Amino acid sequence: MTAAGPRAGRIRRHQWLASAGAAVRTPRGATGLGLAGLVVAVAVIGPLVTPQSPEALLTFPFAKPSGRFPLGADFLGRDVLSRVLDGGWLLLLMAVSATVLGIAAGAAAGISAAYLRGRRDGLIMRTVDVILAFPQLVFALLLLSILGPKLWLIVLAVGLTHAPAVARVLRAATLDVCERDYVKVAELQGMRPAAVMSKEILPSLSTPLMVEAGLRLTYSIIIMAGLAFLGFGQPPPSPSWGTMINENRAGLALNPWAVIIPALLIALLTVGTNLLTDAVGRAALGVDRKPEEAALADELGPARSGVR
Amino acid sequence: MSGAEGKRASEGARYRLEVCGLEIRGGRGGPPVVSEISFAVRPGEVLGLVGESGSGKTTVALALLGHTRRGLSVSAGEIRLDGVDLLRLSPAGLRQVRGARVSYVPQDPSAALNPALRIGYQLREALRVHARGSGESRALEVLGEVRLEATPDMLRRYPHQLSGGQQQRVALAMAFSCRPSLIVLDEPTTGLDVSTQRHILDTVRRLCRVYGVTAVYVSHDLAVVSELASEVAVMYAGRIVEAGPAAMLFGHPLHPYTQGLLASVPVPEGGQLLTGIPGQQPPPGHRGPGCSFAPRCGIALDECRVRVPAPAPVAGRTVRCLRVAEAGAARAQPRQAAAAGPPSGAPVLSVRGVSARHGPVPVLSGIDLEVPPQSCVAVVGESGSGKTTLARCVVGLHRDWTGEMTFQGARLARGARQRPVPVLQQIQFVFQNPYTSLNPRKTVGQIVAEPLQRLLRVPRGEQADRVISVLEDVALGGRYLSRYPDQLSGGERQRVAIARALAAEPSLLVCDEVTSALDVSVQAVVVELLRAATARRHLAMLFITHNLALVRTVAQFAVVLQRGEIVEAGPAGQVLADPGSSYTAQLMADVPRLRSAGPPAGTGGGTRRRDA
């Protein structure tokens, strides 16, 4: 007991670490982490190890793979390998920023709607419904066509369109947590609503937050790549996986690698994050038990949990 | 009706149900969850299977239907019903037996009845499966047997249109409908009001006698068992520690655990101190060597810790204890609670003309009550009487009320948010369910320190000592500081919740059914601790309970609520001993009592009750 005490304590306080750790130990989670980790490594380390300049015109358009250009050349005769290595980091950075923004805005809206109830609940959730009525990509395109293709605007547009779905999920989860008596205890101790939400409610929401974050990250990547494909991304000379797919479509028969490799990387990344998210959600079910379930497990004893 | 082993063997054929050496393990080769379970019941008799949660009583009860919970399996023993071993039957054979010859009444009828099907359909289903006639007339007959309105309209209702008591009657009707030889009742009255409980018990007793059905009644409530059962088996940590005729066992318990359990049962008429049993039962499948009760036993020897006592026939029953002789002699006499002097001074809390509603539904009307300083007022009533709403109005969790409440001379604002911090600190609330009132993400130390930080603004450096001292007040101590709620038992959780309330140094403690989720022996410990702590700190207490038997033990004053109105109020002894209203008198009559000295409960006990 004494040896297990402090370790168990750390795990409970940082609940999300316990769930994530358990997830990575499952085959599903390990596969997801491996795939996503591989793509992230390419995107992060890639810019440091490009064999050629990614923006220089080095050979003829759609050159077949050769010793100097292992993946051949693109439609302007630039090295595809170098462009692939350099073309991921900004996409990742933008996807992560949009996800953080969306989760933060959505969680704040969802938790306060559920906790405050009444008129504020209605106001927040009806706003959410209105935003939800726009398809994400269309909303982003609308903003971009009005305000011009700026990178921060893409992040903002994608982030904001995530918020309503996050708000819905977290509102439902919060309603459940609000019913627990420890939240009422905090109110009786004179805590302000903002403090109750951040200190008592938020820690109990780590599981839905993690799952939502993973899910939204996957969507962010897809939308970001999609926007880049449509021409809303980094301005032309600098490489981007989404842009590359569009640019090199014409030469698909001449040098297919210029399309296949960026497409494959995007696909691997989204499949990887999705698998990981799924594993975290499943692991959290085992780690994070509701108080009533804990009571039941107490009564049934270790026989039941041992079998699971 | 002697339980001597020799006699049992020769009369074997006369028993309806015989369980021999039953052992159930957790998984293949796992630790035994229950072991060496042997008992026998005659036709028409009721066996009470008594134990605290985790003792394995439900596991044994389910085994009587040839069922084990997921992850458990029967590893030894036999269960003979009319001479046929249920454990050897094929799945098809077992299906024939279940419902027709053995039936089951679960604890929670609202979960046992299908909410999407009409009562009539569910009743006829059981009859149809076992080809006992499927007509409406038969279903109506069955309803009549459990004293439900036998009308076609009743058959057309859905479970949610019935009260908890009515639902349990339907479950009883289904269980008795095929005229089984054996019926297993798993705490069928927990969660029901005393009067509903009384009706259910009467029905079970009557039907068992009329149809000669053998019953096994599983319960942690000794008083209920003593009213119904003629034979009792007490389980502890997966073994039967004492078994014998109910009157003998309750009159002169021999095993130290049985003695402890009996000393924990509050008696409605007397205000004796409850002793409870210190310590905790080992979790299922985690028994140490030797007698499982030894760590909690006052008279255990070194030998008790290494050798498992064999069941031995003593004075007409079977006891599993190495120190039976000493245990029989050492039984402590109950101590009377010291009568408190008449409290003086202005009331801490006074409630005048308070009415409350939940949305459009009025819940309380015109409540007047006063809590004098340093005394405890018990608010008693059945579920739906508004007693919890009253408590929530006092602490400010329920805001929809009118009238006036003054606390230490000052008017109380309606909701907690409008009340200043000193008022929040002075009135502390202990919730009913300790499983939801503690934040699972915080340690015991953090939980108990919260009121110090938020209400008393104690500097961080001084908090640790105060937390430890208040934990010691609830008999927990500093080693619990870094534990998390899910590492604690229900009783320990409730003590942490009480410690949190005491840490705020309140002058009024409001307790809402704080023991209803706990076992009797744990309830006794918690109640005793509350009494001692409030006395030491000169606290006033508002004690909400449905358990009339607890009132005399805890409170000096009692207030009886019925449908949101006060029907009676006054000194606790007077209200309970000499009720002025018929409602209180009825409630008192319905409270199950330990029947230790009465006639053999199988026959005489029933007749008298039936007339009541």
Image (tube, rainbow, N blue to C red):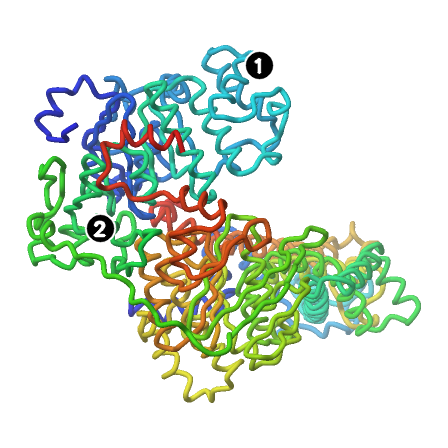
Say whether residue A69 is visible: no
* Quadrant of residue A141 within the rendered picture: bottom right
Position of B83 with respect to B508 (left or right) is left
- Number of labels in the image equals 2
Tag 2 residue: B287
Q: Position of residue B421 (x, y in %)?
A: 58, 81
Lower position in the chain sequence, tag 2 or tag 1: 1
Local crowd at mark 2 within 10 Å, few (<14), some, or many (≥20)?
some
Which residue lies at the image location 38% right of the left edge and 54% below the top edge?
A: B518
Looking at the rendered image, the quarter that the N terminus of chain A falls into is bottom left
Q: In the figure, is residue B546 to the left or right of B236?
A: right
Q: Chain of mark 1?
A: B
Q: Nearer the viewer, mark 2 or mark 1?
A: 1
* Alpha-carbon span between mark 2 and mark 1: 51 Å
Residue B403: x and y, percent?
67, 66
Please name whichever residue, A95 or B3, is drawn nearer the observer in this view of the structure.
B3
In this view of the protein, can residue B241 be seen by the observer? Answer: yes
Q: Is residue A17 left or right of residue A197?
A: left
Q: Whole-percent x and y of residue A120? A: 77, 65
Give amino acid for label 1.
Answer: Glu
- For residue B124, side relative to residue B179 (left or right): right
Instruction: Give the quadrant of residue B402.
Output: bottom right
Instruction: Say above or below: B493 vs A27.
Output: below
CB-based contact (under 8 Å), mark 2 and mark 1: no
Residue that mark 1 sits on: B136
Amino acid identity at mark 2: Arg
Q: Secondary structure at mark 2?
A: loop
What's the residue at 13%, 42% (across, down)? B319
Residue name at image x 55 percent, y 75 percent: A189
